[in-house]
Image (cartoon, grey):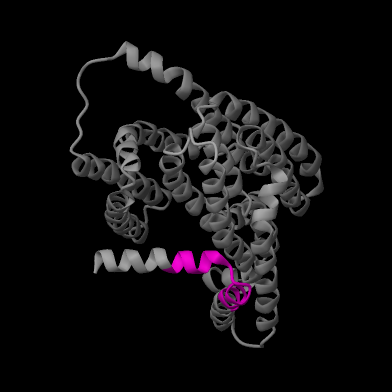
Amino acid sequence: DFYDIPELISVTRIISLLLLINSLSIVQRAIFTIRIDFKTQAKASLIAVVISGIVGISMAYSGYGVWSIVAQTLVNQGLCTILLWFFSQWVPKWTFSYNSFKQLFSFGSKLMIVGILDTLYRNIYTIVIGKKYSAANLGFYTRAEQFAQFPTSNFTGIMQRVTFPVLSQLQNEEERLPIAYIKILRMSAFLIFPLGVGLACVARPLILTLLNETWTPSIRLLQILCFACIWYPIHALNLNLLQVKGRTDLSLIISVAQKIVAAGVLVITIPMGLIPLCIGQIITTILLLIVNTYFTGKLIRVGLFLQLKAIFPYLFYAGIMGACVSFLLQIPVSNPKQLIIGTLGGIVSYIGIALVCKAPEVKELYSIINSHVEKNF
């Protein structure tokens, strides 16, 4: 009724089965995460993605339309859940522990509320744009958002799962925890800033190569959203630290404050158009970073100033890389060639800048990759 699209009714009813399917694999994922075993999780995800992709593409070519996406999503999550059960070899007992519930509820209930608020926040722009503007404008925004969030959302998810058990081992060590946190923060910035800036630079050849001229309005939106999304991993690290310290009450307070700020910026920018609305998201992320780091500073004495000092060099490196990529994209060649030139030029220039400036993350990243290769081969 909200969108006046009756076709969404049956799709929503079927796709909501994901709530049940995903809930059945939560404990298995937690077990692998505690073990820092992401290889098994990746194996289950890869198998599920390949099989569900074949199902979705086959149905799409057979003319099933939107139902091919629904089927692909359900098969993907269903298979992943089955494989996680198989690999973990963990089966729940058919009893209910009130003591466990009581112990975990005070911690988990606040995280649940935070999760619900975050879900509402992530989808509020799509909801409002779909109601306020045309379906075409919603499509342009959604496509830009998907491209912008692809590197950051995947990186953030991996980072949260990896860093939580690592930081948890140091939660009571007042001297080592801030050092480890800064180290993880620097590595995150070293990886995510060039991805975001590089994506903004190659937005035009990327969209025109993968899509077509019809999606040209998405280019400017993507470029703006990239500079909003690059801060998400920093937010996630700050919230991770609060959970490590057992302060889910602060996570809830921060989440409520964030949504109030975001709602205010949204109300101001929504009548102005899509571009001001996207710029508003950059303003929102910066304001929220101030809120997040305030509490981090209280807990481990690593506040906004120290965090910005730690990550600023990599933002500077990414800026120089962006200038190099923009210069290379002036070469008058086809969009696919521009995309290749821009991507390779960005990788080479960023690594070169990092080496010249003697960024310690280059050596550390090389060491991690080298040890992983030796371990597996």
Q: Is residue 275 shown left or right of residue 67?
A: right
Tally of numbered tags:
0
Of residues 177 and 122, the one drawn nearer to the viewer in this rendering:
177
Vertical placement of 322 versus 12: above or below?
Answer: below
Q: Is residue 364 magenta?
A: yes
Q: Which corner quadrant of the image does residue 224 belong to?
A: bottom right
For residue 252, above or below residue 311: above
Residue occupying image coordinates x 45% and y 24% = 108
Q: Return the x and y of residue 23 as percentages of the image width and height.
A: 35, 32
Asked if residue 121 is positioned above or below residue 72 in the image, the reply reads: above
Q: Quadrant of the C terminus?
A: bottom left
Q: Nearer the viewer, residue 157 or 187?
A: 187
Choose between 149 and 258: the one closer to the eye: 258
In this view, the residue farthest toward the front is 175
- Predominant secondary structure in magenta? helix
> Residue at (45%, 36%) from the top-left corner?
12
**Residue at (62% x, 39% y) in the render:** 127
Q: Residue at x 60, y 43 (%)?
A: 235
Give residue 232's position: percent from left, percent from top. 60, 48
Residue 271 shown in magenta: no
Query: Could you tell me if residue 281 is visible in this image?
Result: no
Q: Quadrant of the N terminus?
A: top right
Residue 264 in percent (x, y) is at 77, 34
245 vs 295, left or right, is: left
Please give the range of residues in magenta. 349-366
The answer to whether one can see residue 82 in this image is yes
Left or right, residue 253 beside residue 268: left
Extreme residue toward the top, this view: 98
Query: Does 7 sit above or below residue 183?
Result: above
> Percent x, y for residue 100?
34, 17
